[in-house]
Amino acid sequence: MKNEQWLKNNTFHHRDFWDLRQLVAEKQKQNLRISLCIPTLNEEKTIGKEIVIFKSELMDRYPIVDEIAVVDSGSTDRTRDVAASFGADVYLSSEILPEEGFKRGKGENLWKAIYQLTGDVIVYVDADITNIHPRFVTGLVAPLIHRPQIKYVKAFYDRPLAVAPGVTRPSGGGRVTEILVRPLFSLFFPELTAIIQPLSGEYAVRRDILEQIPFPVGYGVETAHLIDIYVKHGLDAFGQTDLEQRVHRNQPTASLGRMSFGILQTFFNRVHTLGMIGELPQFSTIMRQFQVKDRDYQQVEHQIIEDERPPMDQIAAYREKFHLPA
């Protein structure tokens, strides 16, 4: 019953918030500052269009977003140049909080954005979306503007799946969600199964929530967010918004296997810390996969370590910058 009630009360459609002038007025009335963060690694093909659309529609025409920032992991293509040329603030993750070092991974960029950006709300949007639209931001920040009790809003959508070159199915993406994360949540956190796409890369979060949670630097970051916020604040802290469709490049199955390996590390560490399972064995950090050509069977090893960053409010430089009490 809890899930049904939550789905009814906390699930939105982006068209619920079609009146952007009214949304701007309510945001200004609350004196909210909203930052958009786009984490990148070699996204020169799609980053320019995202910046152009978000800046023209959500900064110049309707001032909903106060800053657009690209936080980059060290792209070797023209990602940073393209983003800067269209007006985004561009940062190298390794140059933010340099005294904390640098760990490669999307979660690292998301974590460092909390320090670098200034918004009361931070919206994260992946950089590889080919059907980008302002709804990828407005649909996520609007529930936070209109419902003060909601702290974290996730996107969900249909995700076309490429089944052959030039051939796609209208849905079928989100394979790791359906094969791994949804079964795990069903076993350990049944209420979280109400979140339709727990691994979606688009979400908006209030700063006072982001600064209190640890960040896995790799594949487990979205799963960790949901569990940690759920444990502290319950299901009612979440909202979710239907953004209709998201088109992006599909990853090969082997890449999804490595993603699952990282998520499992994060998940089991959390259920152990929460006392939901007993002592764990020492996990291997080597993911083994096979390449087969004729009768040549090669085992390929990938080391995947889901290192974690502490809550940002434990970082002295952050506490000083945002005037948190000692």
Image: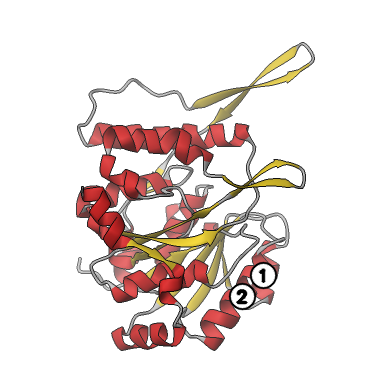
Task: Give the amino acid at mark 1.
Answer: Lys
Left or right: where 159 falls relative to 47: left
Residue 183 visible from this viewpoint? yes
Q: Residue at x 33, y 67 (%)?
A: 207
Front residue of 267/193: it is 193
Instruction: Note whether 302 is above or below 114 in the view shown.
Output: above
Rendering quarter of residue 252: top right
Rendering quarter of residue 254: top right
Image position, residue 7 (x, y; %) = 30, 55
* Disc sitting over residue 152 in the figure: none
Q: Residues within 10 Å of mark 1 (few under 14, many from 20)?
A: many
Q: Residue furthest right?
A: 294
Image position, residue 243 (x, y; %) = 49, 62
Task: Give the amino acid at mark 2.
Answer: Ile
Number of marks drawn? 2
Front residue of 23/70: it is 23
Q: Residue at x 45, y 23 (%)?
A: 284
Residue 313 visible from this viewpoint? no
Q: Residue at x 33, y 70 (%)?
A: 144
Residue beneath disc 2 = 53
Secondary structure, mark 2, is helix
Distance between mark 1 and mark 2 Cα atoms: 6 Å
Secondary structure, mark 1, is helix
Instruction: Note whether 223 is above or below 78 in the view shown.
Output: above
Residue beneath disc 1 = 49
Image position, residue 225 (x, y; %) = 35, 50
Instruction: Note whether 295 is above or below 305 in the view shown.
Output: above
Q: Are marks 1 and 2 in contact (CB under 8 Å)?
A: yes
Q: Quadrant of the C terminus?
A: bottom left
Front residue of 155/1: it is 1
Image position, residue 154 (x, y; %) = 40, 58
Q: Residues within 10 Å of mark 2 (few under 14, many from 20)?
A: some
